Amino acid sequence: MITPKTPPGFNELLPKDQIAFNAMVSRIRTAYELSGFTPLETSALELADVLLAKEDGETAKQVYRFTKGDTDYALRFDLTVPLARYAAEHYHELAFPFRRYQIQEVWRAEKPQAGRFRQFYQCDVDIIGTDSVIAEAEVILAARNAYQSLGLKNITFRISHRGIIGGFLADRKLDRLSTDVLRAIDKMDKLSGSEISNELKKAGLSNKDSKDILSLVSIQGTTKEVTKQLSDLGINQSEFNNAIQNLEELGKLLKASGMKPSEYIFDLRIARGFDYYTGVVFEMFLLGNRSSVGSGGRYDNLVSHYSKEKLSGVGASIGLSRLFSVIKEKNTGPSSPAQALIIVFSENLLPYCFEVASLLRDNNINVEIYPGAAKPAKQLSYANKLGIPFVLLCGENEEKKRQVTIKNMKSGKQITASLSSAVKKIKSLVA
Amino acid sequence: MITPKTPPGFNELLPKDQIAFNAMVSRIRTAYELSGFTPLETSALELADVLLAKEDGETAKQVYRFTKGDTDYALRFDLTVPLARYAAEHYHELAFPFRRYQIQEVWRAEKPQAGRFRQFYQCDVDIIGTDSVIAEAEVILAARNAYQSLGLKNITFRISHRGIIGGFLADRKLDRLSTDVLRAIDKMDKLSGSEISNELKKAGLSNKDSKDILSLVSIQGTTKEVTKQLSDLGINQSEFNNAIQNLEELGKLLKASGMKPSEYIFDLRIARGFDYYTGVVFEMFLLGNRSSVGSGGRYDNLVSHYSKEKLSGVGASIGLSRLFSVIKEKNTGPSSPAQALIIVFSENLLPYCFEVASLLRDNNINVEIYPGAAKPAKQLSYANKLGIPFVLLCGENEEKKRQVTIKNMKSGKQITASLSSAVKKIKSLVA
């Protein structure tokens, strides 16, 4: 006998949570398709050379990579690299700008720890092949609609533009420090005041420049507030000015789309550590939650390793596992999709039970026939355990009169209805 | 520059087919949940020792297996073994009888060839933990409803029971030959008459027994026809008699559920090669298609390698890839979920475009804003390429009068509507 278990760091759901997880995914799909994003799935296994074309030590170490036959395989570790590979591979078959969403598992051999898994779902949405700020607005709106469809109304997008810090440094002829400074700013939330000053010093900034940068990134507020404060700095540098203009246009489009002031804040601390972001960057926060539940931004060229074509675009990624942990906590849903369980009293009543089930299923009522003529108490306890809200009694009397007795498992109340009126009755009860 | 490509034998879909594939999966989910089957997902990576507990040479060779750190991993190669592992692992957390469906990818390092992939979707449905024939009927009905929901009305279930041949042989004291004879019968469709006789001889049957078996398995027809012919053989052997009774009961339940005679035929040639089937077995055929699109049956004990508990049950598996190849051929659907594309005439009209998009999205109309103020001809050609049926013109005139012009891409017809009536107009047009 072998002990049945999954590898350490690999998580599976029990039915109750799987049902809630699927409902979450389904709502996100609907929200993204509402904005015309097309679904995409890429292969779990990729050629290692192709998938890791861009990767250096750290990421590569976490990738599940192995050889079988002549092939060197690697398992998908994010959804961005496969998108780049797919877009380059199918460049002539796709219509650009290409907008897609992708909800799939990724695998990373991280150290297993509480809430961290080696297999988890990512949810990405991107528009590639355009420089227009329409893309930023469309991606942010789609992500916002996805959160809203999950009943998460208290989401705030904190938005910035890497050109603000970049332009500010360029204005002082310090553009060479840009990457390190952005990385330091990205860590601000996790560091104390003196630690962040230290980081900026390490990045090569003087005390004065460091102080000025910290004062710059403390700017936050509405479109008007932030653009005014930035203009007041009197910096006349093209990257800086373009960034301000970009944020201003983006703010206008988000406002026109009905986003409330509480839903988006320009916050210049948002820097995003990844080097490939080149313009607008943003992170999404749930009210009362310090760590972000998603993030995104604009990149200059997604496919540089795979193609001579240049494809710039905007993407957002929702941390689906973290999001689900929020939803899971409040999950009081059932462990079965069945809305009603047909109790089987005896074998000879079975044809009637199946007739009733067919009628209800034909009318889109999810119904299960208990698979066996067990004691009724056992069948009722099964319905209870799964959280099935109604049971249907099809006994001899009911069969004779072509009726069905509907019992509400919560209240214990029961009513008997003719077969012809049962569909309507059950529908109004489960509604 | 690295050539972007997937490994040989790994298939990905373009948007048009991905949309059709997702629609197929979504309909199958709905059909299974209609019968109260709960969704399940198991881990892609399993511990090799656990996953391969039962496997001998042939299957094990095809499994993607590798070591990372201290862990010996194997990729999921079917959905039956993970179900057994999951049911044994979570035995005390699940309610039995446990009914679940599972739609996930599996990986097998088969020789790549036309229509055969190393990564493909399986779709399994099982009820475990019951001996009742209700389970057979429920599984068959759920699979039938899944096919019907895809518009595939011409599906026939060919049903048999392994106890017919088993009992027939036992009656002649030849039960030791049962496995080999069933395997030979399973190949009948692929072999000529003399080849199958040879196989039966190799299995150890005399000429007389071989002839009698071939005459036995030629029996097919309705419940009544088959059970009468079998009874007429005058065999009085318990396994044989139980099998007849089982088929008779099953036929009764399928009939009570409204299945038409053309939808299920008892056909004693159906044997299923797998050893783990112990009772009713069946295969599903699409009219005019010689190879089956699915199959299933009853097994005595699913979890024998993982638990002392005994869990018998019934399962059916739909070959999703083969099924999709049928659907794909006729796929004339769009390459985008968008029902309408908003044409962007100029940057300063953007806030109005976003306002219109928000209004439509709030009313569940899938709408995309073209991401850039490209030439209108280019935007129209993009809509054409993606098969988006309507474009919305929000020009200066429209903005001023708070209107939108709706253009049907197929007919070229266009109408202008006030913003307040646009939702209703577009909804009736896309319906």
Image: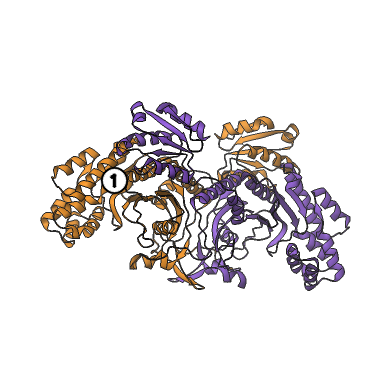
Chain colours: A purple, B orange
Given the image, on which type of amino acid does mark 1 rest?
Arg
Q: Residues within 10 Å of mark 1 (few under 14, many from 20)?
A: many
Q: Is residue A42 above or below residue B346?
A: below
Q: Secondary structure at mark 1?
A: strand
- In the image, B56 versus B308, the foreground residue is B308
Residue A312 in picture, x, y percent from top left: 66, 57
- Subunit of label 1: B
Q: Is residue A116 above or below residue B36?
A: below
Residue B107 in picture, x, y percent from top left: 43, 61
Asked if residue B36 shows in the view, the reply is no
Say whether residue A333 is left or right of residue B99.
right
- In the image, A99 versus A226, the foreground residue is A226
- In the image, A285 versus A77, the foreground residue is A285
Asked if residue B101 shows in the view, the reply is yes
Q: Is residue B155 above or below residue A40?
A: above
Q: Residue at x 80, y 72 (%)?
A: A201
Q: Residue at x 74, y 54 (%)?
A: A159
Q: Is residue A8 above or below residue A401?
A: below
Q: What residue would you read off at disc 1?
A: B158
Residue A420 in picture, x, y percent from top left: 41, 26
Say whether residue A269 is left or right of residue A366.
right
Residue B266 in picture, x, y percent from top left: 25, 44
- In the image, A144 versus B307, the foreground residue is B307
Quadrant of the rendered image containing residue B204: bottom left
